Amino acid sequence: MKCTADSVLSIEDLHIHFPTDQELIRAVNGVSFSIPRGRTLALVGESGCGKTVTAYSILKLIEKPGKIVSGKITLYPKEENPVAIASLHPKSDTLYRLRGQMVSMVFQEPMTALSPVHTIGSQVAESLRIHENKSRKQAEALTVDMFRRVGIPGPRARLKQYPYEISGGMRQRVVIAMALICQPELLIADEPTTALDVTIQAEIMNLMKELQKQMNLSILLITHDLGLVAQNADDVAVMYMGRIVEQGPVRKIIKTPRHPYTIALLKSLPGLHPAGEPLESIRGSVPSGACIPPGCPFHPRCKYAQKNLCDRGRPPESQPLSPDHRVACLRAEEIQA
Amino acid sequence: MTTQNKMPLLSVRDLCKYFHLPCGRRWSRKTISVKAVDHVSFDLYPGETLGLVGESGCGKTTTSRAIVRALRPTRGKILFSDSGTPVDLACLSERQLKKIRPKIQMIFQDPFSSLNPRMTIGSIVTEPLVINKIGNAKTRKEQMAEMLTKVGLKPEDAARYPHAFSGGQRQRIGIARALILKPSFVICDEPVSALDVSVQAQIINLLRELQRQFEWTLIFVAHDLNVVRYISDRVAVMYAGRIVELGDTETVFNQPGHPYTKTLLSAIPYPDPDRKMEYKHMGQVADPGHLPAGCSFHPRCSHCVELCRQKQPDLIAQGDDHFIGCHLV
């Protein structure tokens, strides 16, 4: 996917490292993607593949000792000049303004994303008061309106409640209200429904889709659940060990995956499997980011890996199979799911 | 699976577990009773897998804990007939329980907190033998090595500590610990929900393989309906402490009878962009502390009639081995 004029975000060749006392952990190694306005890009991968770190880097929320080593992150606000994020100081005014106003986040655990000692009303109104200089009254009215839009029943009475008084699904709605109250252009949703039940998950995802349509919102959806991806994303980028191994429109990735990792992930889902046959699993587990295997990082677990081809040299570059479908595999041409 | 002509290994009858929580002002003696498990009955036949599904707070974990007597049930019978004569686990003393416990083992959800970080893998896996005074040091070590190989680890791993292993490997250690006593009945409480998809498949395959080898009877508690469908022979759907539907996995998934099961199934995101979800909003889960009168699902049910508000439905057989707890079937 090339960066087009109508993107909200583009990331080019991003590298993020975490130097520790003992070793250097390479969390993100050359990630590039862009998100078109009004669409949903899903970043998929197992834990430790670098998807969360990539997302956090967009707002420079990476904690020490993590560092953006190289690469470009550019945000394109609607009525302003593009902003290059990677070179900004983490405490700069520009970032302070962008956070919450142009880009906002929804986190995995709604309980830890909310302050336990403030009422939910004041937490949601806070960003209005800070970013848009609204008076207490105005902010309250807008909050009530937002609560109504995210489907919180009895919004006015809820303003004065604390997070412990409401259920998990309601809390996630509050977090979404908080994220959307300043009408951002990009919403980063980091595993927004992992902590919730399927029924609540369905409700939250439907709500996000609904609001996306109303507000022409772009969403970066971070998840490990391919079912959620198939139902909600427009484009997909599959990550493994800090690299995007395959990216393209959702239908192509799910129906005709070409990277062995994507193929294996889809085959290991019990939902797509006839009962009785053993599930196809990927052998071994994800290696640590400190000792990335040479050659293609996936080769030790790959069933298509070829000796003397996949296990040496530099990791394979991402090649276009068709204009909108890119795969980083040396044998992508031969492999059919 | 033909279940009619066999003796059940476990039959649970009217199992109830109520928790009494303080309510009202501080120091007041008022309590409310939370009906975590309410009149649950089912049979489990040797060699089969029963999946327990439902949303969080529906009582699936409490049910499984009451069965292993990690909790004392408020009421009800848990008849376990491993050696021919049924024993009621619900009213055994701790000492009597200790004799029977090796037959019943449990595999836990979180592979990180269920292993003691200060014990080596070897001592974690042999501990059940030590507690039950089985064998001597040498035979225990041999058995431990055998179990580790069975679950796909190396006998050399015995000297290492849990922190050296990944999530999937730790779950294998948990399985080896349950396996070493040669149980006939194993309860898995969300064994794969903390794992990544690719590792999840490895563990599910391992559980199925071991079940075949050792003829385990399994209760498989999970909230991931796809996993439950894949591994279970029969499924029990729980809502607010009760079983609302019980039957053959394929019957329940293909022809769900209870409106709750239907909604639950419609909420599964299917990994196919062409098959859109048909989930409809249905409001809040019932609070087990303040259950509505009548059928506890009625405030969320779109088919609700007057009878549902007044009378709690019983679980009634609809065809072969398919039980539904709804007035309107």
Image: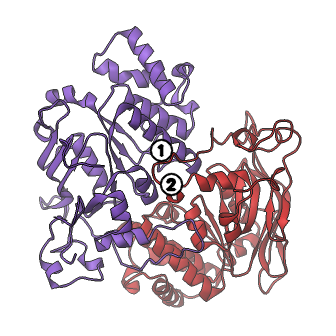
Host chain of mark 1? B
Residue at 30% in and 78% down = B300
Q: Which residue is mark 2?
A: A270
Along the line of sight, the residue nearer the viewer: B99 or A66: B99
- Same chain for the residues under marks 2 and 1 in the image: no
Residue at 77% in and 80% down = A77
Along the line of sight, the residue nearer the viewer: A124 or B61: B61
Query: Along the horizontal axis of the image, is A228 left or right of B323?
Result: right
Q: Position of residue A61 (x, y in %)?
A: 69, 60
- SS of the residue at dot 1? helix
Query: Along the horizontal axis of the image, is B71 left or right of A213?
Result: left
Q: Is B114 drawn above or below residue B278 in the view shown?
A: above
Residue at 18% in and 66% down = B24
- SS of the residue at dot 2? helix
The quadrant the C terminus of chain B occupies is bottom left
Confirm or deny contact between disc 2 and disc 1 (CB under 8 A): yes
Q: Is A16 drawn above or below residue A235 in the view shown?
A: above
Q: Position of residue A286 (x, y in %)?
A: 65, 42
Report which colour depicts chain A.
red
Host chain of mark 2? A
Which chain identifier belongs to the purple chain? B
Q: Position of residue A43 (x, y in %)?
A: 67, 62
Q: The disc labelled 2 sits on which kind of residue?
A: Pro
Query: Along the horizontal axis of the image, is A49 left or right of B266?
Result: right
The image quadrant of residue B131 is: top left
Q: Residues within 10 Å of mark 2 (few under 14, many from 20)?
A: many
Q: Position of residue A160 (x, y in %)?
A: 39, 78
Q: Residues within 10 Å of mark 1 (few under 14, many from 20)?
A: many
Label 2 – label 1 distance at C-alpha: 9 Å
